[in-house]
Amino acid sequence: MITVEHRGYKIVFNEHADEWSCPEVNHFSSPSLLKVRAKIDSMLLSVRKKIAVKCFEIGSSHNSRWAQEKIEATIVEYEKQEIVRKYGSQETISINHLVASVAQRPGSSKASRRTAKLSELMSDTPEAHAAHDAFLVLLEEERAAARRTEAAFKAIPRVTVEDIAELHKIAKKGDDD
């Protein structure tokens, strides 16, 4: 008896019937291993569509464009866990959970799938939306303060050539030689 595994499902080859079957998927069988695998993929796709989670892509930085735009998305699959280690060490710094996110992003006319970290996605709950609204208010305050800071810095009087006229005069005499 030959057995293989596909996406965690056991597929068995029945030599007498000359076919592959997967007891866990309604005892589906076929002479083609590819067809059994395709049936498993189709079943899993159907299940994932039913349990997909609505969310919003907001990026990983408060300065990212997505953080402000809040792109509607759907988590369609958990892909894997990624352990981030300190450079040159086995010390774990963090763990990223990677998922497949489907969204229609700016600049695109249709939805596309991309791998995203859970930390880049916002829940579709009233609390999350309220927190995002509060973030946007603070972000605008931060930007306004940055503009005022820049303007204040530019308003600081600078040394002019007139302030160093004597030094400038000496230097010009040296250029005449």
Image (cartoon, rainbow, N blue to C red):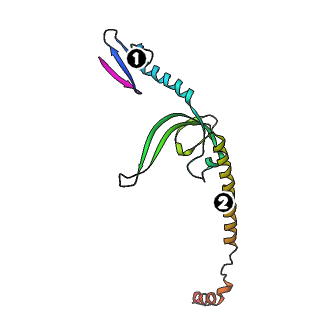
Q: Is residue 71 magenta?
A: no
**Which x, y percent locates residue 171?**
59, 87
According to the image, label 1 marks what residue?
23
> Which residue is at the far left?
1
Where residue 170 appears, as percent x and y from the top left, is 60, 90
How busy is the neighbourhood of tag 1: few (under 14 within 10 Å), some, or many (20 plus)? few
Q: Quadrant of the C terminus?
A: bottom right
Residue 76 in the image: above or below residue 12: below
Q: Main secondary structure of the magenta part?
A: strand
Point out which mark residue 142 bears.
2
The answer to whether the residue labelled 2 contacts the one labelled 1, judged by CB atoms less than 8 Å apart, is no
Viewer can see residue 106: no
Q: In the rendered image of this protein, does residue 67 appear above or below residue 23?
A: below
* Element on which disc 2 rests: helix
Residue at 60%, 53% in the rendered image: 62
**Tag 1: amino acid:** Pro
Q: Residues within 10 Å of mark 2 (few under 14, many from 20)?
A: few
Residue 162 picture quarter: bottom right
Residue 123 sits in which quadrant? Answer: top right
Give the residue type at disc 2. Answer: Glu
Q: Position of residue 118 (x, y in %)?
A: 53, 42
Q: Residue furthest front?
A: 127
Q: CA distance from mark 2 to mark 1?
A: 59 Å
Residue found at the very far top of the displayed protein? 17
How far across and down, in percent of the image, does residue 116 sit? Answer: 52, 41
Residue 102, visible in the rendered structure: yes
Range shown magenta = 1-6
Which of labels 2 and 1 is toward the front? Answer: 1
Q: Is residue 62 above or below residue 106?
A: below
Image point 67% across, 46% down: which residue? 130
